[in-house]
């Protein structure tokens, strides 16, 4: 369960790469998607495609660790 939350936190990290990176070639996926949504033009299809690319690894990891995730939730919710 901790591995799942750690992966999601690292995968969706936005603020630190936004502060540190200045070259658009080195942007992470989440910062790059924000870069695509500019004031002058925004292509919703490209942003939706980037969102799906960012979401698919999280869904795959959750599907693989689903049993452990709900087991941990169940153990934490049972009062003894």
Image: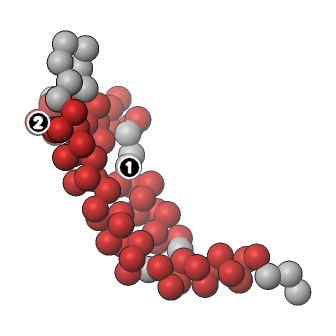
Q: Decide if residue 2 is on the left or right side of residue 46.
A: right
Secondary element under disc 2, as helix, strand or loop, is helix
Residue 12 in percent (x, y) is at 38, 49
Q: Quadrant of the C terminus?
A: bottom right
Residue 4 in percent (x, y) is at 46, 69
Quarter of the figure with residue 40: top left
Rendered view: 42 above or below 13:
above
Residue at the farthest right position: 80
The residue under the point 54% across, 77% down is 69
Rendered view: 57 above or below 80:
above
Residue 75 in percent (x, y) is at 71, 83
The residue under the point 39% across, 46% down is 13
| Of residues 50 and 12, the one drawn nearer to the viewer in this rendering | 50
Which residue is disc 1 drawn over? 12
Q: Report crowding for label 1: few under 14, some 14 to 19, many 20 or more residues within 10 A (C-alpha).
A: some
Q: Decide if residue 26 is on the left or right side of residue 9.
A: left
The residue under the point 35% across, 29% down is 19
């Amino acid at each position: 369960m901790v591995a799942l939350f750690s992966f999601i936190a690292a995968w969706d990290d936005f603020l630190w790469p936004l502060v540190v990176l200045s070259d658009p070639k080195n942007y992470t996926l989440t910062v790059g998607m924000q870069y695509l949504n500019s004031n002058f033009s925004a292509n919703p299809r490209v942003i939706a495609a980037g969102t799906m690319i960012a979401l698919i690894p999280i869904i795959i990891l959750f599907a693989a660790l689903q049993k452990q995730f709900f087991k941990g939730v169940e153990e934490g919710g049972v009062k003894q």
